[in-house]
């Protein structure tokens, strides 16, 4: 037994040594085309945030994540962009184009390096060894080995599942195969060796668009607005055309996971013997949003339902508890006053479940200041004609056109029924 343990230890040592040697070889070959991307606050002259980037052609085009440079795009009068190369040289960067849906940006340095990364011609095989490069926690450029696990399951926005440590500061860096060819772009981590990459085809599409135009986008916010409009059209069309699955919630029936990329979780207090009321809830969400800035997210759908029933509370106590549950409902996305207007709301009494149930409904919307025609919409309805029993239905849509929001509202209201 002891000899077997020694053999396994020796084999593991050989494998780890080989991986380390391979990583070192790749790093030494590729590091001239790697950069730290810096967002500099102009008033103080200090770094506000950092990320990674990599050159992808001989003309000095550099790829990174949009979220790395979003501060500059949103507030170019407050920040400036610069790169830091392996020799300690710093210089300003120009933004060529962005893709906020896939969290990508193209930058350019005025004096190109002769070194740049090649883009892979094919998708990696399942389980293929990959290497993620970047600058974690401002500690200097490193290379992290991992494996390719295909696209993230049940996701509206395509992401590659990478088994490896994509740490803060590595965002925007490349992940390469054993040939040193880029197969994805570091974008996020869930910890415990779970990382996510933007697929290479998204970068290729963005780069080809720039090559064909031959010039930088002048109005980046207009470009972002176009992308947000196209995205919500695709998202809402897919949701509205889906066959919504219905599930039981207490004495009611409500929509469940209406598409593969909207997941639901449930909870209840049925195990609380001393509870004076019974509550069962369902919360459904996409689990991912479009990043616009540190304080602004969009492109999300969230739905919540809560069924309440009591045999112990009187009607006054029950409806007081009911109102407390209503007060807890709010928007699911983050936005600041500079990004959106105040919510404007309208109230109405509506008949649901083919007229069998009466509910008080409130629908609110707030407009995007920088992206005309897009709104965040929040809806809440509460039934009131069931004796000491109620159903609260709530949804939030972020970054939608009003016509699509109204279609969603109609389908949402028709989907909740009493058993």
Image (cartoon, helix red, strand yellow):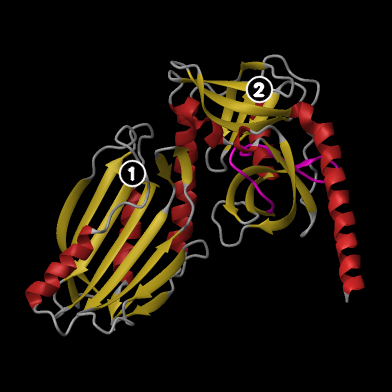
Q: How many marks?
A: 2
Q: Badge 2, how many Cα within 10 Å: few under 14, some, many 20+?
A: some
Residue highlighted by disc 1: 375
Mark 2 or 1: in front is 2
The tag earlier along the polypeptide, 2 or 1, is 2
Query: Is residue 12 depicted above or below 28 in this figure?
Result: below
Q: Is residue 116 visible?
A: no
Q: Is residue 168 magenta?
A: yes
Query: Is residue 320 depicted above or below 117 in this figure?
Result: below
Residue drawn at 58 percent across, 41 percent down: 168
Question: In the image, which residues are magenta?
Answer: 163-182
Residue drawn at 19 percent across, 75 percent down: 357
Picture quadrant of residue 133: top right
Residue drawn at 43 percent across, 52 percent down: 300
* Left or right relative to 312: residue 253: right
Q: Position of residue 277 (x, y in %)?
A: 21, 79
Q: Badge 1, how many Cα within 10 Å: few under 14, some, many 20+?
A: many
* Left or right relative to 122: residue 384: left
Q: Is residue 126 magenta?
A: no
Q: Position of residue 139 (x, y in %)?
A: 65, 34
- The residues bearing labels 2 and 1 have C-alpha atoms spaced at a distance of 39 Å
Which type of secondary structure does the marked residue at label 1 adopt?
strand
Quadrant in the picture for the C terminus: bottom left
Pointer 2 with pointer 1, Cβ within 8 A: no
Residue highlighted by disc 2: 84
């Amino acid at each position: 037994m002891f000899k077997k343990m020694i053999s396994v230890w020796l084999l593991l040592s050989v494998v780890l040594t080989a991986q380390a040697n391979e990583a070192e070889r790749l790093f030494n070959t590729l590091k001239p085309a790697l950069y730290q991307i810096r967002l500099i606050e102009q008033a103080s002259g200090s770094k506000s945030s950092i990320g990674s980037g990599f050159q992808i052609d001989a003309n000095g085009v550099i790829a990174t994540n949009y979220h790395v440079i979003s501060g500059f795009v949103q507030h170019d009068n407050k920040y400036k962009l610069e790169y830091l190369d392996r020799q300690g040289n710093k210089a300003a960067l120009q933004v060529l184009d962005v893709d906020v849906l896939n969290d990508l940006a193209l930058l350019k340095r005025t004096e190109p390096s002769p070194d740049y990364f090649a883009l892979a011609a094919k998708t990696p095989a399942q389980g293929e060894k990959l290497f993620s490069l970047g600058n974690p926690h401002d500690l200097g450029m490193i290379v992290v080995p991992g494996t390719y696990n295909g696209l993230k399951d049940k996701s509206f926005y395509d992401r590659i599942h990478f088994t490896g440590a994509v740490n803060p500061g590595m965002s925007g860096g490349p992940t390469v195969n054993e040939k040193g060819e880029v197969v994805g772009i570091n974008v996020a981590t869930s910890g415990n060796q779970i990382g996510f990459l933007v697929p290479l085809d998204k970068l290729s599409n963005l780069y080809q668009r720039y090559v064909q135009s031959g010039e930088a986008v002048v109005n980046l916010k207009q470009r972002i607005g176009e992308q947000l409009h196209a995205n919500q059209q695709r998202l809402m069309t897919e949701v509205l055309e889906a066959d919504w699955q219905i599930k039981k919630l207490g004495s009611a029936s409500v929509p469940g996971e209406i598409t593969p990329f909207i997941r639901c979780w449930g909870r209840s207090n049925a195990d609380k013997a001393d509870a004076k009321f019974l509550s069962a809830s369902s919360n459904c969400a996409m689990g991912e949003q479009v990043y616009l800035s540190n304080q602004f997210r969009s492109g999300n759908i969230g739905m919540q339902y809560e069924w309440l029933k009591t045999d112990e509370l009187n009607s006054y106590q029950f409806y007081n508890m009911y109102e407390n549950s209503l007060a807890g409902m709010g928007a699911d996305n983050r936005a600041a006053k500079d990004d959106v207007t105040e919510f404007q709301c309208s109230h109405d009494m509506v008949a649901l479940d083919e007229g069998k149930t009466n509910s008080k409904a409130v629908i609110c919307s707030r407009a995007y200041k920088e992206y005309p025609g897009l709104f965040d919409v929040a809806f809440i309805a509460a039934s009131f004609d069931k004796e000491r029993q109620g159903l609260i239905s709530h949804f939030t849509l972020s970054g939608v056109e009003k016509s699509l929001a109204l279609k969603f509202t109609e389908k949402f209201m028709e989907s909740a029924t009493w058993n």
